[in-house]
Image (spheres, rainbow, N blue to C red):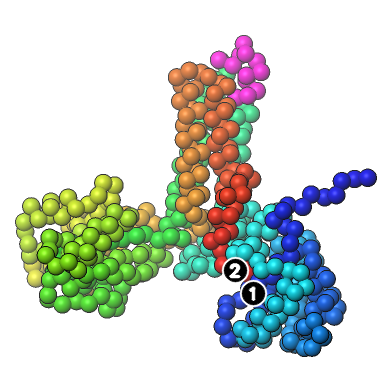
Amino acid sequence: MPDAPHIHPRLADTIVARATPAGRGGIAVIRVSGPGTRDIALALTGELPRARHATLAGFRDSAGEALDLGIALFFPAPHSFTGEDVIELHSHGGDVLVDLVIARVLELGARMARAGEFTERAFLNDKLDLAQAEAIADLIDAGSEAAARAAQRSLRGDFSAAVAALNERVTELRVWVEAALDFPDEDIEFLQSEELRSRLDGVAAHFEQMAATVRAGCLLRDGLRVVIAGRPNAGKSSLLNALAGHEAAIVTATPGTTRDLVREAIDIDGLPVHVADTAGLRDSVDAIEREGVRRARAEIGRADHALLVIDATDTSVASIDALRAELPPGVGHTLVRNKCDLTGETPGAAPDGAAIVLSATTGAGIGALRERLKSVAGFQPAGEGLITARRRHLDRILIARRHFDEACRLLDTAGAGELMAEELLQAQNALAEITGEFSSDDLLGKIFGSFCIGK
Protein backbone atom coordinates (compact mmCIF):
# COMPACT_ATOMS: atom_id res chain seq x y z
CA MET A 1 0.00 0.00 0.00
CA PRO A 2 1.56 3.33 -0.97
CA ASP A 3 2.38 5.85 1.73
CA ALA A 4 -0.01 8.74 2.22
CA PRO A 5 1.23 11.95 0.62
CA HIS A 6 3.27 14.12 2.95
CA ILE A 7 1.50 17.31 4.08
CA HIS A 8 3.59 20.20 5.29
CA PRO A 9 2.57 21.05 8.90
CA ARG A 10 1.87 24.62 7.80
CA LEU A 11 -0.77 23.32 5.35
CA ALA A 12 -2.79 21.04 7.63
CA ASP A 13 -5.36 23.63 8.74
CA THR A 14 -8.09 25.42 6.85
CA ILE A 15 -7.66 29.17 7.17
CA VAL A 16 -9.94 32.19 6.76
CA ALA A 17 -9.43 35.95 6.64
CA ARG A 18 -10.97 39.07 5.23
CA ALA A 19 -9.07 39.94 2.03
CA THR A 20 -10.40 43.48 1.66
CA PRO A 21 -9.68 46.40 4.04
CA ALA A 22 -11.78 46.81 7.16
CA GLY A 23 -14.52 49.45 7.15
CA ARG A 24 -17.81 50.10 5.41
CA GLY A 25 -18.03 49.40 1.69
CA GLY A 26 -20.20 47.94 -1.02
CA ILE A 27 -18.44 44.58 -1.03
CA ALA A 28 -16.10 42.68 1.29
CA VAL A 29 -14.19 39.56 0.21
CA ILE A 30 -13.59 36.72 2.66
CA ARG A 31 -11.07 34.10 1.61
CA VAL A 32 -11.01 30.46 2.81
CA SER A 33 -8.26 27.97 1.89
CA GLY A 34 -7.30 24.48 2.96
CA PRO A 35 -8.44 20.86 3.15
CA GLY A 36 -11.78 21.68 4.82
CA THR A 37 -12.87 24.28 2.29
CA ARG A 38 -15.42 22.08 0.46
CA ASP A 39 -17.18 21.00 3.69
CA ILE A 40 -17.30 24.61 4.88
CA ALA A 41 -18.76 25.76 1.55
CA LEU A 42 -21.46 23.07 1.70
CA ALA A 43 -22.42 23.91 5.28
CA LEU A 44 -22.38 27.67 4.72
CA THR A 45 -24.15 27.90 1.34
CA GLY A 46 -25.97 24.56 1.03
CA GLU A 47 -24.06 23.49 -2.08
CA LEU A 48 -20.59 23.45 -3.57
CA PRO A 49 -20.49 26.26 -6.15
CA ARG A 50 -19.50 25.38 -9.71
CA ALA A 51 -15.74 25.76 -10.15
CA ARG A 52 -14.58 29.23 -11.23
CA HIS A 53 -18.13 30.53 -11.76
CA ALA A 54 -19.64 33.35 -9.74
CA THR A 55 -22.59 31.81 -7.89
CA LEU A 56 -25.34 33.70 -6.07
CA ALA A 57 -25.49 32.08 -2.64
CA GLY A 58 -27.07 32.58 0.75
CA PHE A 59 -24.67 32.46 3.71
CA ARG A 60 -26.39 30.80 6.67
CA ASP A 61 -25.67 30.37 10.36
CA SER A 62 -25.82 27.11 12.34
CA ALA A 63 -29.60 27.40 12.70
CA GLY A 64 -30.07 27.87 8.98
CA GLU A 65 -30.93 31.54 9.33
CA ALA A 66 -29.67 33.89 6.61
CA LEU A 67 -26.57 35.94 7.39
CA ASP A 68 -26.28 37.51 3.95
CA LEU A 69 -26.92 36.99 0.25
CA GLY A 70 -23.72 37.27 -1.76
CA ILE A 71 -21.44 35.70 -4.34
CA ALA A 72 -19.40 32.53 -3.84
CA LEU A 73 -16.40 31.66 -6.07
CA PHE A 74 -14.89 28.19 -5.75
CA PHE A 75 -11.39 27.39 -7.02
CA PRO A 76 -10.55 23.68 -6.70
CA ALA A 77 -6.97 22.57 -6.07
CA PRO A 78 -4.48 22.85 -7.62
CA HIS A 79 -5.89 25.62 -9.83
CA SER A 80 -6.09 28.34 -7.23
CA PHE A 81 -3.86 31.08 -5.81
CA THR A 82 -2.73 28.90 -2.89
CA GLY A 83 -2.75 25.59 -4.79
CA GLU A 84 -5.41 24.33 -2.35
CA ASP A 85 -9.21 24.34 -2.47
CA VAL A 86 -10.18 28.00 -2.10
CA ILE A 87 -13.52 29.71 -1.80
CA GLU A 88 -14.03 33.45 -1.91
CA LEU A 89 -17.18 34.81 -0.28
CA HIS A 90 -18.28 38.23 -1.52
CA SER A 91 -20.58 39.72 1.08
CA HIS A 92 -21.91 43.21 1.71
CA GLY A 93 -19.13 45.30 3.17
CA GLY A 94 -20.13 46.05 6.74
CA ASP A 95 -17.78 45.10 9.57
CA VAL A 96 -20.48 43.43 11.68
CA LEU A 97 -21.76 41.38 8.76
CA VAL A 98 -18.26 40.27 7.76
CA ASP A 99 -17.50 39.29 11.36
CA LEU A 100 -20.67 37.16 11.45
CA VAL A 101 -19.70 35.28 8.26
CA ILE A 102 -16.12 34.73 9.48
CA ALA A 103 -17.41 33.55 12.87
CA ARG A 104 -19.56 30.95 11.07
CA VAL A 105 -16.54 29.75 9.03
CA LEU A 106 -14.51 29.45 12.23
CA GLU A 107 -17.37 27.51 13.81
CA LEU A 108 -17.17 25.09 10.87
CA GLY A 109 -13.52 24.24 11.62
CA ALA A 110 -11.32 26.91 10.11
CA ARG A 111 -8.91 29.15 12.01
CA MET A 112 -7.91 32.76 11.42
CA ALA A 113 -5.06 33.11 8.96
CA ARG A 114 -1.76 34.58 10.03
CA ALA A 115 -0.33 37.59 8.22
CA GLY A 116 0.71 36.55 4.71
CA GLU A 117 -0.38 32.94 5.18
CA PHE A 118 -2.30 32.65 1.90
CA THR A 119 0.79 33.74 -0.05
CA GLU A 120 2.97 31.48 2.08
CA ARG A 121 0.79 28.53 1.08
CA ALA A 122 1.14 29.50 -2.57
CA PHE A 123 4.90 29.35 -2.08
CA LEU A 124 4.84 26.02 -0.21
CA ASN A 125 2.60 24.55 -2.92
CA ASP A 126 5.00 25.67 -5.68
CA LYS A 127 2.58 28.16 -7.19
CA LEU A 128 5.27 30.84 -7.04
CA ASP A 129 8.77 31.22 -5.66
CA LEU A 130 9.87 33.37 -2.75
CA ALA A 131 10.92 36.38 -4.84
CA GLN A 132 7.55 36.34 -6.60
CA ALA A 133 5.74 36.08 -3.26
CA GLU A 134 7.60 39.13 -1.97
CA ALA A 135 6.71 40.96 -5.19
CA ILE A 136 3.02 40.62 -4.32
CA ALA A 137 3.55 42.64 -1.14
CA ASP A 138 5.68 45.13 -3.08
CA LEU A 139 2.92 45.53 -5.67
CA ILE A 140 0.36 46.27 -2.95
CA ASP A 141 2.70 48.76 -1.27
CA ALA A 142 3.94 50.41 -4.49
CA GLY A 143 4.10 54.18 -4.08
CA SER A 144 4.56 55.08 -7.75
CA GLU A 145 3.75 53.82 -11.22
CA ALA A 146 7.40 52.88 -11.72
CA ALA A 147 7.40 50.80 -8.52
CA ALA A 148 4.15 49.08 -9.50
CA ARG A 149 5.46 48.16 -12.97
CA ALA A 150 8.73 46.87 -11.49
CA ALA A 151 6.80 44.75 -8.96
CA GLN A 152 4.71 43.31 -11.80
CA ARG A 153 7.90 42.24 -13.58
CA SER A 154 9.17 40.51 -10.45
CA LEU A 155 5.78 38.86 -9.92
CA ARG A 156 5.72 37.42 -13.42
CA GLY A 157 9.15 35.90 -12.75
CA ASP A 158 11.63 38.21 -14.50
CA PHE A 159 13.79 38.62 -11.39
CA SER A 160 13.68 34.91 -10.57
CA ALA A 161 14.71 34.06 -14.14
CA ALA A 162 17.70 36.42 -13.89
CA VAL A 163 18.79 34.83 -10.60
CA ALA A 164 18.37 31.36 -12.12
CA ALA A 165 20.53 32.34 -15.11
CA LEU A 166 23.34 33.53 -12.84
CA ASN A 167 23.04 30.43 -10.68
CA GLU A 168 23.23 28.28 -13.79
CA ARG A 169 26.53 29.89 -14.81
CA VAL A 170 27.96 29.29 -11.33
CA THR A 171 26.72 25.70 -11.51
CA GLU A 172 28.43 25.15 -14.85
CA LEU A 173 31.71 26.38 -13.36
CA ARG A 174 31.37 24.08 -10.39
CA VAL A 175 30.56 21.08 -12.57
CA TRP A 176 33.57 21.85 -14.73
CA VAL A 177 35.90 22.16 -11.74
CA GLU A 178 34.60 18.97 -10.12
CA ALA A 179 34.91 17.09 -13.42
CA ALA A 180 38.57 18.13 -13.59
CA LEU A 181 39.12 16.76 -10.08
CA ASP A 182 38.21 13.31 -11.38
CA PHE A 183 41.32 13.45 -13.55
CA PRO A 184 44.12 14.44 -11.14
CA ASP A 185 46.82 14.24 -13.82
CA GLU A 186 45.07 16.91 -15.84
CA ASP A 187 43.52 19.20 -13.21
CA ILE A 188 46.47 21.59 -12.92
CA GLU A 189 46.51 22.19 -16.66
CA PHE A 190 42.75 22.56 -16.65
CA LEU A 191 42.70 25.06 -13.76
CA GLN A 192 45.17 27.23 -15.64
CA SER A 193 43.31 27.10 -18.97
CA GLU A 194 42.29 30.23 -20.81
CA GLU A 195 38.78 28.89 -21.25
CA LEU A 196 38.28 28.65 -17.48
CA ARG A 197 39.62 32.18 -17.02
CA SER A 198 37.24 33.44 -19.67
CA ARG A 199 34.30 31.77 -17.93
CA LEU A 200 35.30 33.25 -14.57
CA ASP A 201 35.48 36.73 -16.11
CA GLY A 202 32.05 36.24 -17.66
CA VAL A 203 30.49 35.18 -14.35
CA ALA A 204 32.15 38.12 -12.55
CA ALA A 205 30.60 40.52 -15.07
CA HIS A 206 27.23 38.80 -14.60
CA PHE A 207 27.49 39.32 -10.82
CA GLU A 208 28.21 43.02 -11.35
CA GLN A 209 25.21 43.41 -13.62
CA MET A 210 22.95 41.55 -11.21
CA ALA A 211 24.10 43.59 -8.21
CA ALA A 212 23.42 46.83 -10.09
CA THR A 213 19.94 45.62 -11.08
CA VAL A 214 19.09 44.59 -7.51
CA ARG A 215 20.42 47.86 -6.05
CA ALA A 216 18.17 49.77 -8.44
CA GLY A 217 15.25 47.54 -7.44
CA CYS A 218 15.91 48.15 -3.74
CA LEU A 219 16.06 51.87 -4.36
CA LEU A 220 12.76 51.85 -6.24
CA ARG A 221 11.10 49.92 -3.41
CA ASP A 222 12.65 51.53 -0.33
CA GLY A 223 13.65 54.96 -1.65
CA LEU A 224 16.58 57.19 -0.77
CA ARG A 225 16.75 58.42 2.84
CA VAL A 226 17.96 62.02 2.85
CA VAL A 227 18.52 64.28 5.85
CA ILE A 228 18.74 68.08 5.66
CA ALA A 229 21.31 69.36 8.15
CA GLY A 230 23.00 72.66 8.90
CA ARG A 231 23.27 75.56 11.28
CA PRO A 232 20.17 77.46 12.45
CA ASN A 233 18.66 79.86 9.90
CA ALA A 234 20.59 78.36 6.97
CA GLY A 235 17.26 77.70 5.22
CA LYS A 236 16.81 73.98 5.90
CA SER A 237 13.05 74.12 6.38
CA SER A 238 12.67 76.34 3.32
CA LEU A 239 14.62 73.75 1.34
CA LEU A 240 12.32 70.96 2.53
CA ASN A 241 9.31 73.02 1.44
CA ALA A 242 10.89 73.69 -1.95
CA LEU A 243 11.60 70.00 -2.54
CA ALA A 244 8.14 68.93 -1.34
CA GLY A 245 6.33 71.61 -3.32
CA HIS A 246 4.22 72.71 -0.33
CA GLU A 247 4.56 74.16 3.17
CA ALA A 248 5.63 71.02 5.02
CA ALA A 249 7.69 72.81 7.69
CA ILE A 250 7.29 76.07 9.59
CA VAL A 251 9.64 78.81 8.42
CA THR A 252 10.45 81.89 10.53
CA ALA A 253 13.37 84.28 10.92
CA THR A 254 13.85 83.09 14.51
CA PRO A 255 16.82 80.70 14.86
CA GLY A 256 15.94 77.26 16.23
CA THR A 257 12.35 77.09 14.96
CA THR A 258 12.66 73.40 14.05
CA ARG A 259 12.97 71.33 17.20
CA ASP A 260 11.83 67.88 16.13
CA LEU A 261 12.24 65.92 12.90
CA VAL A 262 9.92 66.90 10.06
CA ARG A 263 9.57 64.12 7.49
CA GLU A 264 8.27 64.29 3.96
CA ALA A 265 8.07 61.71 1.15
CA ILE A 266 8.67 63.13 -2.32
CA ASP A 267 8.95 61.68 -5.80
CA ILE A 268 11.73 62.70 -8.17
CA ASP A 269 10.93 61.31 -11.62
CA GLY A 270 9.91 57.98 -10.07
CA LEU A 271 12.63 57.91 -7.38
CA PRO A 272 11.05 57.78 -3.89
CA VAL A 273 12.96 60.11 -1.57
CA HIS A 274 12.29 60.23 2.18
CA VAL A 275 13.48 63.64 3.41
CA ALA A 276 13.92 64.65 7.05
CA ASP A 277 14.37 68.25 8.13
CA THR A 278 16.29 68.57 11.40
CA ALA A 279 17.05 71.04 14.16
CA GLY A 280 19.94 73.42 13.52
CA LEU A 281 23.26 71.98 14.69
CA ARG A 282 24.57 74.16 17.50
CA ASP A 283 25.20 74.09 21.24
CA SER A 284 22.19 75.33 23.19
CA VAL A 285 21.18 75.84 26.81
CA ASP A 286 17.55 75.16 25.90
CA ALA A 287 16.69 71.55 26.89
CA ILE A 288 14.15 71.09 24.09
CA GLU A 289 16.53 72.39 21.44
CA ARG A 290 19.34 70.16 22.79
CA GLU A 291 17.07 67.15 22.38
CA GLY A 292 16.27 68.29 18.84
CA VAL A 293 19.98 68.50 18.03
CA ARG A 294 20.53 65.04 19.48
CA ARG A 295 17.75 63.64 17.28
CA ALA A 296 19.20 65.47 14.29
CA ARG A 297 22.60 63.84 14.78
CA ALA A 298 20.97 60.41 15.19
CA GLU A 299 18.98 60.91 11.97
CA ILE A 300 22.13 61.89 10.08
CA GLY A 301 23.69 58.59 11.15
CA ARG A 302 20.75 56.63 9.67
CA ALA A 303 20.58 58.50 6.37
CA ASP A 304 21.79 57.37 2.97
CA HIS A 305 22.79 60.93 2.12
CA ALA A 306 22.97 64.31 3.84
CA LEU A 307 22.27 67.75 2.40
CA LEU A 308 24.55 70.12 4.29
CA VAL A 309 22.86 73.51 3.95
CA ILE A 310 24.93 76.66 4.46
CA ASP A 311 24.00 80.31 4.22
CA ALA A 312 25.81 81.46 1.05
CA THR A 313 26.30 84.89 2.63
CA ASP A 314 28.66 83.25 5.15
CA THR A 315 31.99 82.82 3.34
CA SER A 316 33.81 81.20 6.27
CA VAL A 317 35.60 78.01 5.23
CA ALA A 318 35.98 77.07 8.88
CA SER A 319 32.21 76.94 9.36
CA ILE A 320 31.86 74.56 6.40
CA ASP A 321 34.61 72.30 7.74
CA ALA A 322 32.97 72.29 11.18
CA LEU A 323 29.65 71.29 9.63
CA ARG A 324 31.25 68.45 7.68
CA ALA A 325 32.85 67.26 10.92
CA GLU A 326 29.32 66.58 12.24
CA LEU A 327 28.89 63.76 9.71
CA PRO A 328 29.41 60.17 10.89
CA PRO A 329 31.78 58.00 8.83
CA GLY A 330 30.20 56.49 5.73
CA VAL A 331 27.46 59.09 5.22
CA GLY A 332 27.84 60.84 1.89
CA HIS A 333 26.84 64.46 1.56
CA THR A 334 26.09 67.28 -0.84
CA LEU A 335 26.97 70.84 0.11
CA VAL A 336 24.02 73.15 -0.60
CA ARG A 337 24.80 76.87 -0.84
CA ASN A 338 21.43 78.46 -0.10
CA LYS A 339 20.29 82.10 -0.53
CA CYS A 340 21.95 82.70 -3.90
CA ASP A 341 19.24 85.33 -4.47
CA LEU A 342 21.13 87.45 -1.89
CA THR A 343 24.65 86.81 -3.19
CA GLY A 344 24.06 87.02 -6.91
CA GLU A 345 25.60 83.57 -7.56
CA THR A 346 24.36 81.63 -10.56
CA PRO A 347 22.01 78.83 -9.40
CA GLY A 348 22.82 75.24 -10.30
CA ALA A 349 25.83 73.02 -9.85
CA ALA A 350 28.90 75.04 -8.79
CA PRO A 351 31.63 75.25 -11.48
CA ASP A 352 34.00 73.18 -9.35
CA GLY A 353 31.30 70.55 -8.74
CA ALA A 354 31.71 70.90 -4.98
CA ALA A 355 28.24 72.27 -4.23
CA ILE A 356 24.74 73.02 -5.47
CA VAL A 357 23.95 76.72 -5.50
CA LEU A 358 20.28 77.56 -5.03
CA SER A 359 17.63 79.70 -3.45
CA ALA A 360 15.08 77.76 -1.43
CA THR A 361 12.93 80.91 -1.34
CA THR A 362 12.68 81.47 -5.10
CA GLY A 363 13.19 77.86 -6.20
CA ALA A 364 16.17 78.70 -8.41
CA GLY A 365 18.59 75.76 -8.55
CA ILE A 366 16.15 73.21 -7.04
CA GLY A 367 16.15 71.29 -10.35
CA ALA A 368 19.93 70.87 -10.12
CA LEU A 369 19.56 69.49 -6.58
CA ARG A 370 16.96 66.99 -7.75
CA GLU A 371 19.31 65.81 -10.49
CA ARG A 372 22.09 65.55 -7.91
CA LEU A 373 19.97 63.29 -5.70
CA LYS A 374 19.18 61.02 -8.65
CA SER A 375 22.88 60.85 -9.48
CA VAL A 376 23.81 60.06 -5.86
CA ALA A 377 21.29 57.22 -5.85
CA GLY A 378 22.47 55.88 -9.21
CA PHE A 379 18.84 56.06 -10.26
CA GLN A 380 17.70 55.40 -13.81
CA PRO A 381 14.12 55.93 -14.99
CA ALA A 382 12.08 52.75 -14.97
CA GLY A 383 12.76 50.72 -18.08
CA GLU A 384 11.85 47.26 -19.27
CA GLY A 385 14.55 45.61 -17.20
CA LEU A 386 13.83 47.25 -13.84
CA ILE A 387 12.48 44.94 -11.14
CA THR A 388 11.56 45.41 -7.51
CA ALA A 389 13.97 43.94 -4.98
CA ARG A 390 14.70 43.92 -1.27
CA ARG A 391 17.75 44.36 0.90
CA ARG A 392 17.59 40.61 1.58
CA HIS A 393 18.11 39.92 -2.11
CA LEU A 394 21.08 42.27 -2.35
CA ASP A 395 22.65 40.70 0.74
CA ARG A 396 22.39 37.24 -0.86
CA ILE A 397 23.89 38.52 -4.11
CA LEU A 398 26.82 40.08 -2.26
CA ILE A 399 27.41 36.94 -0.17
CA ALA A 400 27.36 34.80 -3.31
CA ARG A 401 29.82 37.22 -4.93
CA ARG A 402 32.19 36.96 -1.95
CA HIS A 403 32.20 33.16 -2.25
CA PHE A 404 32.83 33.46 -5.98
CA ASP A 405 35.70 35.90 -5.41
CA GLU A 406 37.19 33.53 -2.84
CA ALA A 407 36.98 30.71 -5.38
CA CYS A 408 38.92 32.86 -7.85
CA ARG A 409 41.48 33.73 -5.17
CA LEU A 410 42.01 30.06 -4.33
CA LEU A 411 42.56 29.34 -8.00
CA ASP A 412 45.14 32.11 -8.32
CA THR A 413 47.08 31.44 -5.11
CA ALA A 414 46.82 27.71 -4.53
CA GLY A 415 45.31 26.06 -7.56
CA ALA A 416 43.07 24.30 -5.04
CA GLY A 417 40.26 22.78 -7.09
CA GLU A 418 38.50 21.10 -4.16
CA LEU A 419 38.30 24.30 -2.13
CA MET A 420 37.29 26.25 -5.21
CA ALA A 421 34.39 23.87 -5.84
CA GLU A 422 33.22 24.27 -2.23
CA GLU A 423 33.19 28.07 -2.51
CA LEU A 424 31.17 27.82 -5.72
CA LEU A 425 28.68 25.56 -3.91
CA GLN A 426 28.29 28.18 -1.17
CA ALA A 427 27.68 30.82 -3.84
CA GLN A 428 24.94 28.61 -5.32
CA ASN A 429 23.27 28.23 -1.91
CA ALA A 430 23.26 31.99 -1.36
CA LEU A 431 21.60 32.60 -4.73
CA ALA A 432 19.07 29.82 -4.07
CA GLU A 433 17.93 31.62 -0.90
CA ILE A 434 16.59 34.49 -3.04
CA THR A 435 13.93 32.33 -4.69
CA GLY A 436 13.45 30.00 -1.74
CA GLU A 437 14.98 26.85 -3.20
CA PHE A 438 17.15 26.90 -0.09
CA SER A 439 15.40 28.52 2.90
CA SER A 440 14.65 28.09 6.61
CA ASP A 441 11.34 28.28 8.46
CA ASP A 442 12.68 31.30 10.37
CA LEU A 443 13.26 33.12 7.10
CA LEU A 444 9.76 32.27 5.87
CA GLY A 445 8.23 33.45 9.12
CA LYS A 446 10.06 36.76 8.92
CA ILE A 447 9.10 37.37 5.29
CA PHE A 448 5.43 36.42 5.40
CA GLY A 449 4.93 37.96 8.84
CA SER A 450 5.45 41.36 7.21
CA PHE A 451 2.47 40.84 4.86
CA CYS A 452 -1.04 42.08 5.60
CA ILE A 453 -3.76 39.76 6.94
CA GLY A 454 -5.74 38.13 4.12
CA LYS A 455 -2.84 38.18 1.64
Say whether residue 184 is magenta.
yes
Q: Which label was assigned to residue 453?
A: 2
Q: Which residue is mark 1?
A: 18
Q: Is residue 373 left or right of residue 33?
A: left
Lower sequence index among marks 1 and 2: 1
Q: Is residue 232 visible?
A: yes
Q: Residue at x 51, y 58 (%)?
A: 388
Against 417, is 95 above or below?
below
Q: Main secondary structure of the magenta part?
A: helix
Q: Amino acid at mark 1?
A: Arg
Assess whether residue 315 is covered by the magenta stretch: no
Pointers 1 and 2 in contact (C-beta within 8 Å):
yes
Residues 279 and 214: in front is 279
Q: Which mark is residue 179?
A: none
Quadrant where the image shows the N terminus: top right
User: Does the rendering let one see residue 348?
Assistant: no
Quadrant position of the C terminus in the picture:
bottom right
Task: Locate residue 239, reporting x and y percent.
Answer: 23, 69
The magenta stretch spans which residues?
A: 177-189
**Residue type of the residue flagged with mark 2:** Ile
Mark 2 burial class by Cα count in 10 Å: few <14, some 14-19, many 20+: many
Image: 83 above or below 330: below
**Rendering coords of residue 98 (x, y %):** 66, 81
The residue under the point 36% across, 69% down is 265
Name the residue rendered at 56%, 60% in the picture: 449
- Residue at the image position 6 percent from the left and 59 percent from the top: 315
x%, y% of residue 200?
Answer: 51, 31
Please state the horizontal and vertical placement of residue 402, each as a whole percent of the image.
Answer: 46, 35
| SS at badge 2 | loop
